[in-house]
Amino acid sequence: MEEQKRYGHFDDQHREYVITDPKTPWPWINYLGNEDFFSLISNTAGGYSFYKDAKFRRITRYRYNNVPMDNGGRYFYIRENSPSTGGNWEEAWNPGWKPCKTPLDFYECRHGMGYSRITGKNGVEASVLFFVPLKKWAEVQKLTLKNESAEVKRLKLFSFEEWCLWNAATDMENFQRNFSTGEVEIETSPLEGLGGATIYHKTEYRERRNHYAFYHVNTEIQGFDTDRETFVGLYNEFANPDAVMEGRPRNSHAHGWSPIASHYIEVTLQPGESKDFVFLLGYVENEQDKKFIAPQVINKEKAHALIAELNTAEKVDKAFAELCAYWDALLNIYHVKTGNDKLDRMVNIWNQYQCMVTFNFSRSASFFESGIGRGMGFRDSNQDLVGFVHQIPSRARQRIIDIASTQFPDGGCYHQYQPLTKRGNNDIGGGFNDDPCWLIFGTVAYIKETGDFGILDEMVPFDNQPGSEVTLFEHLKISMDHVINNLGPHMLPLIGRADWNDCLNLNCFSWDPNESFQTTENVSEGTKAESLMIAGLFVVTAKEYVSLCHKLARLSSSQDTALAYEAEADRMAAAADAMTEAVKKHGWDGEWYLRAYDFYGRKIGSHECEEAKIFIESQGWCTMAEIGADEGMVAKSLDSCKKYLECEHGMVLNNPAFTKYIYEYGEISSYPEGYKENAGIFCHNNPWVIIGECIAGRGNDAWSHYAKILPSYVEEKYQTLHKVEPYVNCQMVAGKDAFRPGEGKNSWLTGTAAWMWYTVSEFILGIKPDYDGIRIDPCLPETATDYTVSRKFRDAEYEITIHPNGAQKGVKQIVLDGFAVEGTVIPYTPGRHHVEVVM
Ligand code: BGC
């Protein structure tokens, strides 16, 4: 194996990952913004910004899969002419090394919670703090230039942003129009009462858009550019723009082509002097009747107001302190001290941070997701909730309503919806038969965290159609019914277009490379393909639904309502029993659970199959559902995962990998061996088996599977091989059959984040929110030592110390504020509490 270099390290005290070599094996990115205004930023300042929706409101332009990689971003070009340079203007350089790639004396990128600080030194030091202040539609870039030398430094500074013409998809394809629409306005210094200079991007504002963007700097400028071709030169690159190379701006005014924003500032720094410059990339929406102040002149009132809030280093520092305090509070909700740094930093910092990011973006915008193809996934966003609900329950509540509003009256739903419009995405449609179950999963997690049963009474429409509203509880009911109403020949759930595994397309039957695997159903009539993954998911979900109904019966004010809930609980318990029996009868292969039945009723994931004899998804869900536990099925299935799926980097999705395309199976067999859904380590589903292990009480096995895909363990060993960011989970790590086992892909936006959180917080460390309190039920490796979890829960705060005493599972005694508790649930009461748990 190649030599494993290190490109950075964790700084737990500051909750940062510190990158010390700009040439990471792949751009290592961070996310800025909490709500509405968002940015992606790489360790060399590449990336882009958008408002709410990376497709429909892209503010700055970014070209994916570029050469060189990660080109385009917010760039500062610096050139120096000082006594020691002999009166010559030195080569241009950037604090983030790219795009000029001039060698630096020092480089560092610190990715923190909602901010990144990139520092470069080349004679002078240039440090840029990037963040999106809370509740502001703007990215702040605070640049500090520092002269630590004994001589006077004279500098030319050029800023740079490239505007996207709003719709990121048409921006990349409709050039016959785009090259004629671009428009800007320029306000040079001094802005009345504000100072500084602002470049406005107002393409299409003259017609239907009521929004524009701006790029401001809080100081007087000596020039600017807004036309890309003039600034860069048609045959130059970001690395050597004409204006920078010649050291003079052109004061260009863009008319069509590609508008940009660049300020030119001349700076003199005395020995020991440092200067701050605040750049602000903002977004504004105007009311229809207040769009213009004169023909063609945009109303800048809101932009000026936003600038006034953030136009000094002091104001920016205050906004930054607020952002840090916000994260302090969020990360204090669940905090563990185990003494194992690698575990603590993931639980306390990075896993929770990634959960916020996946909640915000679902699978829409990363350096692998272009922000164009996929909005918010129905199943994805429901799962993301489980990792996020403890952080900001009110936002989780709104998300549940938004998701449920994309359902149809039969319980089916759109597979995805657009974040800006909240409307279901017609291009992909519905028909993924696992989707409905996840609504119960997300909603139950929300109610257990908050005790807010009132959400079930919210009136929620179908397909966003006004007048179609029913209660959220009714949405849950039809979600369950959707499974029951769509059973196949073995009384197992019909798979539809696919279940959780988007690539198991058993009704697709495609020989045409122009067809999409996911939306093509060449044999939908009389479809018979069935899924064991949905069967297990249904049983787990039904158990939750049944206990919710019992709880609602107890809370009911009338006897009739209580009886109705009890009857509903009985109905669903019977359905779960029937499903359990169907799995035991038709879904067991002797050593593991089958994966599916294909269109012809043939087994998938069986020892009888030539390839892909065993799949992970059904092992995870059927063991979580404890189907056939008494008959030994659960233990055998978990053992088979270890025997056939596990490898050095985690558990692969299926084994052996498919080596040829099977047209009855669809996309899954289209991937080369060991990648993605064809025997890749699809990290998302490893936690399912780990939870199965925890429920079975096998703490040693649970821990060893968990540590294999825990980023902090991987970080220590394999930064070069792993390739992608070492501080978060990625969707897929190449499996044992791949060309480079262990290589990661598709970082950041993956359900792995929420599932890793759910697994470690509730099943390994064993702190599980429940309707009436917190259930304590850890499952640990024998080597675990005493640990303490501080958990804020509703209006209470618990400090829970667990004494494992070498046990893997089984709580012997719980003492709450000095009194022994019956059972394993500490009943909820507001206030501060101290809990001792003996295993
Ligand atoms: C999708 C998930 C899906 C998974 C497995 C991901 O890319 O976002 O919805 O469950 O792939 O196919």
Image (tube, rainbow, N blue to C red):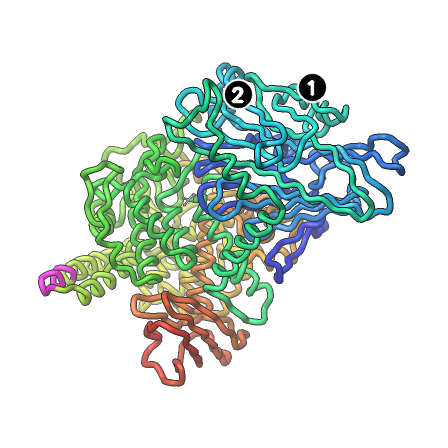
Q: Name the residue under label 2.
A: 183
Q: In this view, which residue lies farthest toward the front?
A: 193
Q: Position of residue 26 (x, y in %)?
A: 63, 42
For this rendering, which residue is in front, 26 or 607? 26
Q: Where is residue 80 in the image (x, y as percent from the top left)?
A: 80, 35
**Could you say which quadrant of the image residue 127 lies in?**
top right
Earlier sequence position, callout 2 versus callout 1: 2
Q: Residues within 10 Å of mark 2 (few under 14, many from 20)?
A: many
What kind of residue is marked 2?
A: Glu
| Residue at screen point 36% across, 46% down | 379
Tag on residue 235?
A: 1
Q: Where is residue 297 in the image (x, y as percent from the top left)?
A: 49, 22
Most common SS among magenta residues: helix
The quarter of the rendering in which ligand 1 is drawn is top left
| Residue at screen point 64% across, 24% down | 225
* SS category of the residue bearing label 1: loop
* SS category of the residue bearing label 2: loop
| Residue at screen point 73% across, 27% down | 244
Q: How far apart are marks 2 and 1 (CA)?
A: 23 Å
The stretch of residues the image draws in magenta is 558-565
Residue 462 falls within the magenta-colored stretch: no
What kind of residue is marked 1?
A: Tyr
- Of circles 2 and 1, the one toward us is 2
Residue 560 falls within the magenta-colored stretch: yes
Where 771 sits versus 684, above or below?
A: below
